[in-house]
Amino acid sequence: MIEPFVEAQRREGCISYGLSSYGYDARVSDEFKIFTNIDSAVVDPKDFAANSFVDRQTDVCIIPPNSFALARTVEYFRVPRDVLVICLGKSTYARCGIIVNVTPLEPEWEGHVTLEFSNTTPLPAKIYANEGACQFLFLKGNEPCETSYADRAGKYMGQRGVTLPRL
């Protein structure tokens, strides 16, 4: 269901990741799309402009004040038909004013999870690649869902890398 899977929580010298009591703490990869206003682009989910961000592959991503970055998990997820997955940001980032947002992973969805990092502070903020970013909680239903994400041929099925909005 999760590849690669870390069977115990790792925390020595890093923001923790791996299996926790009732969830899984996933890592952020080293691929980032950092939003910028260099070209005065407008963020439009129906017509997303590629000039509204810059790509960076780095061990430490610096998000400008009051800005935003997209990234992805190191882990690739395959959600069973009778499971819904909810994600919450790690408290280490939240206590620094960095919000991690992820929409729920629906039954039978699979892919790298695109992570949205918002820097709500007036200061630059660091995100550390290959360290914990968020915790996934797995909710098992009493029975498989009637229509899964795979059944609907969802537009983000099988995504790899940082995935931009699709219409």
Image (tube, rainbow, N blue to C red):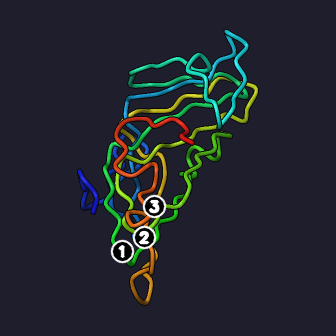
Q: Residue at x 39, y 52 (%)?
A: 157
Q: Are marks 1 and 2 in contact (CB under 8 Å)?
A: yes
Q: Amino acid at mark 2?
A: Ser
Residue that sits furthest to the bottom in the current view: 142
Q: Secondary structure at mark 3?
A: strand
Numbered circle sitting on residue 123: none
| C-alpha gap between disc 3 and disc 2 | 19 Å
Q: Classify residue 126 by image quadrant.
A: top right
Q: Earlier in the sequence, mark 1 or mark 2?
A: 1
Residue beneath the point at 39% across and 41% down: 131
- Residue 101, image x, y percentages: 59, 49
Q: Of the residues shown, which amino acid type is indicated by label 1?
A: Arg
Amino acid type at image mark 3: Phe
Q: Is 15 located above or below residue 21 in the figure?
A: above
Residue 109 drawn at (x, y percent): 39, 60
User: Does residue 157 appear left or right of residue 3 in this picture?
Assistant: right
- Residue marked by disc 1: 81
Pick the front one: 44 or 21:
44
Which corner quadrant holds the N terminus? bottom left
* Left or right for 10, reference 167: left
User: Which one is earlier in the sequence, the residue at label 3 or at label 2?
Assistant: 3
Q: What residue would you read off at disc 3?
A: 136
Q: Which residue is mark 2?
A: 148
Q: Position of residue 66 (x, y in %)?
A: 73, 28
Q: Relative to 123, does residue 139 appear above or below in the rendering?
A: below
Q: Residue at x 44, y 63 (%)?
A: 152
Residue drawn at (40%, 49%) of the image: 16
Quadrant of residue 28 in the image?
A: top left
Q: Is residue 65 above or below residue 15?
A: above
How many labels were placed on the picture? 3
Mark 1 and mark 3: Cα distance apart in space: 16 Å
